[in-house]
Image (cartoon, rainbow, N blue to C red):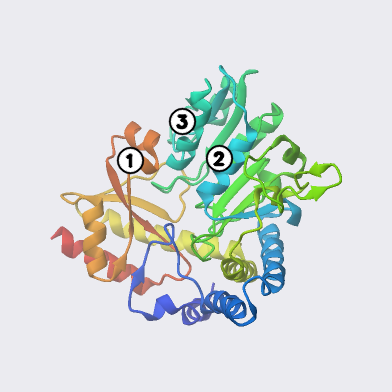
């Protein structure tokens, strides 16, 4: 990306004009003015024409968003559903995979997202077991270790691709190859991946993939994507249904034959209008260009952090994402986040509950987290590093 490209992105993003340095894109990124305009325009239509009457236009915008999501993920449009959050999307798909039986096994990476583990407790209550796939010497989930765990009782392999508590990029494609070889359902939590790096669901061999709209996609809060492989769809029996997801026919109420069986008739078309615009912007910019800039900026930050006495980085793996987990000696991560916020610098902070298996394995109570976007600049980095040096001193 050229300096002009970056400046145009920033000029079109109100948050970049506020004087705040935003390094919390993994929590929620900054929307463009065009995304805000799309949301407001749909709300105004609803106020002017009537909310239900404006739904026809909203449905058109929702389908544009669905096509843009399919383009981004290399997926058929019919395989995309929308949800209110990434956790809600994942939980709906997981519950639809049941019912669970005693002795069935769920294999997860050590870095599994806490909300997914919470949803799995329904299976545990039915007698299923959650087992952790061993890591390799770098701390990433090990595909060969996974292969050695496979037996007839494994009902699901689940992977958090880019964990919330560090820069690890798990080998999602290699894990998918194991799952496909043994015909075992494979779910990917791609909440921190979609919009940050290229995502091709065909190459990943996944049956289900979810991502939030508010993170690297720069969409509004309250939106998420759910991909379901078309040939896997019939194995999923959603518990939540209405006349949209299971429309009436001569034989009764039948589930839709596309991913929209996970949607309902009640939806915020305004939010989907904003998400659709955000997805189109990602596609126009090119996620490969985004990924190249994120890698460059995040490595620049990591190098600078290594020069600050008392900073400890918590990266795992050999190749790192734009999520940078660290601690500063003498500082609680949440207090550090608060103090930087007073300096108008936004970062994130995670506790054990977000990634409990990995945090406990590494004896970490909390981590501070910097997450990078193409919106960030060298000047942003200088302000961040300068503020950390001041707090360290």
Inspect this view and state whether residue 174 appears. Answer: no
Label 2 vs label 3: CA separation?
11 Å
- 92 and 176: which one is in front? 92
Q: Position of residue 249 (x, y in %)?
A: 83, 48
Q: Please tell me which of labels 3 and 1 falls first in the chain.
A: 3
Q: Mark 2 or mark 1: which is in front?
A: 1
Q: Quadrant of residue 45?
A: bottom right
Q: Is residue 79 above or below residue 297?
A: above
**Residue 23 placement, left or right of 239:** left
Q: What number is the disc on residue 352?
A: 1
**Residue 241 placement, left or right of 251:** left
Q: Position of residue 308 (x, y in %)?
A: 23, 56
User: Do the CB atoms of the residues marked 2 and 1 lie less than 8 Å apart?
Assistant: no
> Residue, x 33% and y 33% (percent of image)?
360
Helix, strand or loop at label 3? It is loop
Q: Residues within 10 Å of mark 3 (few under 14, many from 20)?
A: some
Report the residue marked by disc 3.
135
Helix, strand or loop at label 1? It is helix
Q: Please tell me which of labels 2 and 3 falls first in the chain.
A: 3
Q: Quadrant of residue 115?
A: top left
Q: Please tell me which of labels 2 and 1 falls first in the chain.
A: 2
Q: Residues within 10 Å of mark 1 (few under 14, many from 20)?
A: some
Q: Position of residue 70 (x, y in %)?
A: 70, 58
Q: Residues within 10 Å of mark 2 (few under 14, many from 20)?
A: some
Report the residue marked by disc 2.
171
Label 2 vs label 1: CA separation?
23 Å
């Amino acid at each position: 990306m050229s300096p002009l490209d970056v400046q145009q992105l920033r000029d079109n993003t109100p948050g970049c004009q506020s004087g705040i340095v935003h390094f919390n894109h993994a929590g929620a990124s900054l929307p463009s003015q065009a995304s805000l305009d799309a949301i407001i325009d749909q709300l105004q239509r609803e106020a002017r024409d009537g909310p239900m009457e404006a739904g026809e236009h909203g449905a058109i915008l929702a389908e544009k968003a669905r096509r843009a999501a399919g383009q981004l993920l290399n997926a058929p449009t019919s395989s995309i559903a929308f949800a209110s959050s990434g956790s809600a999307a994942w939980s709906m798909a997981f519950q639809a995979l049941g019912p669970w039986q005693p002795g069935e096994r769920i294999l997860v990476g050590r870095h599994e997202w806490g909300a997914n583990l919470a949803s799995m407790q329904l299976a545990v209550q039915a007698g299923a077991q959650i087992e952790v796939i061993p890591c390799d010497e770098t701390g990433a989930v090990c595909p060969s270790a996974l292969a050695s765990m496979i037996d007839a009782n494994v009902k699901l392999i689940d992977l958090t691709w880019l964990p919330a508590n560090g820069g690890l990029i798990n080998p999602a494609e290699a894990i998918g190859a194991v799952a496909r070889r043994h015909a075992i359902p494979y779910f990917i939590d791609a909440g921190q991946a979609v919009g940050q790096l290229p995502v091709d669901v065909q190459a990943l061999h996944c049956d289900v993939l979810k991502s939030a709209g508010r993170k690297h996609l720069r969409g509004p809060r309250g939106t998420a994507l759910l991909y379901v492989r078309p040939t896997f769809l019939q194995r999923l029996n959603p518990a939540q249904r209405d006349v949209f997801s299971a429309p009436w026919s001569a034989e009764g109420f039948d589930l839709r034959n596309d991913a929209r069986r996970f949607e309902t008739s009640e939806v915020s078309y305004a939010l989907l209008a904003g998400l659709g615009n955000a997805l189109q912007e990602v596609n126009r910019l090119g996620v490969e260009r985004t990924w190249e800039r994120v890698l460059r900026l995040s490595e620049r930050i990591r190098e600078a952090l290594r020069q600050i006495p008392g900073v400890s980085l918590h990266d795992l793996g050999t190749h790192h994402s734009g999520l940078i987990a660290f601690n500063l000696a003498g500082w609680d991560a949440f207090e550090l986040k608060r103090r930087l916020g007073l300096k108008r610098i936004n970062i994130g902070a995670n506790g054990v509950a977000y990634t409990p298996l990995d945090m406990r394995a590494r004896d970490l109570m909390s981590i501070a987290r910097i997450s990078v976007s193409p919106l960030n600049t060298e000047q942003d980095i200088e302000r961040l590093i300068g503020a950390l040096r001041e707090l360290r001193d």
